Image (cartoon, rainbow, N blue to C red):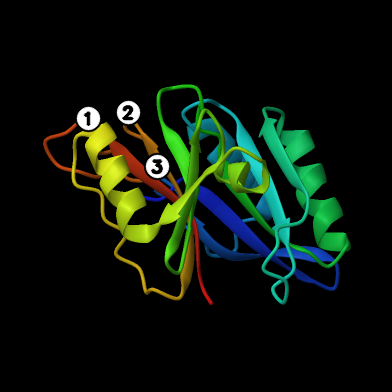
Amino acid sequence: MNVAQFVSFTPENGVPHLAYARLSHETNLHGVLHETLLEVLLEHSSEKSVNVRSYHPNDSKSREFIYGLKNIDDVVGAVNRLSSEGLHTIVNETIDVKDGGVSGVLMGNVIEFAPDDTPRCVEKPGTASLPRGIGRELLSTVYGVSISFPVPFASRLEFSVHPRPRGWRRQMFWLGNSLTMILLIFSLQ
């Protein structure tokens, strides 16, 4: 699958430590400072902008979410501050939500989504909420391609469908079509 470019960190004694990264730019991650990884991510993001998500692993609800940071000092400062609070962080490339795409969350048999927003749209009123199969068929009809969610049924999947190539692969998710799917977070149960 194609995923948004990201770097994630676990807090160890209040300091961010690399957990995982997916970057379009080939980077040897061994021993690289978190500041350097964040700089590479910001430089290679399509919009030259990143988002910082925070969470506690024992709580399925997200914590602070900072959207559209363009200054490396602001990104590093946010990750350091959130790590000092004992929170895990995921820094991902910002994707223009007003490009004709749709974002949402699939969890179990429920899919929720809205246009012109991030997957956090599910926290707002007015978001479409449908059974998994009907929602998938609706998205497939609207975007003119077969959309599938090849994840375990008990998973929570944040997703976005966009009309231009995005993500670490910088290629189309569906071959022969102008859509690409960005999967932002995938966590089992």
Q: Under tag 2, what secondary structure?
A: loop
Q: 109 or 5: which is nearer to us? A: 109
Residue under numbered circle 3: 167
Is 119 displayed left or right of 101 in the figure? right
Circles 2 and 3 in contact, beta carbons < 8 Å: no
What's the distance in space between the residues labelled 3 and 1, CA to CA?
A: 14 Å
Upstream in sequence: badge 3 or badge 1: 3
Sequence-wise first label, 1 or 2? 2
Quadrant for the N terminus in the image: bottom left
Residue at 31% across / 41% down in the picture?
A: 139
Label 3 vs label 1, nearer the camera: 1
Label 1 crowd (10 A; few <14 / some 14-19 / many >=20): some
145 left or right of 114 in image: left
Secondary structure at badge 1 equals loop
Residue identifier under label 1: 178
Percent of width and height locating residue 121: 60, 41
Q: Nearer the viewer, mark 2 or mark 3?
A: 2
Residue 153 in picture, x, y percent from top left? 39, 73
Label 1 close to label 2 by CB (< 8 Å): yes
Q: Residues within 10 Å of mark 3 (few under 14, many from 20)?
A: many
Callout 1, which amino acid? Ser
Residue type beneath disc 2: Pro
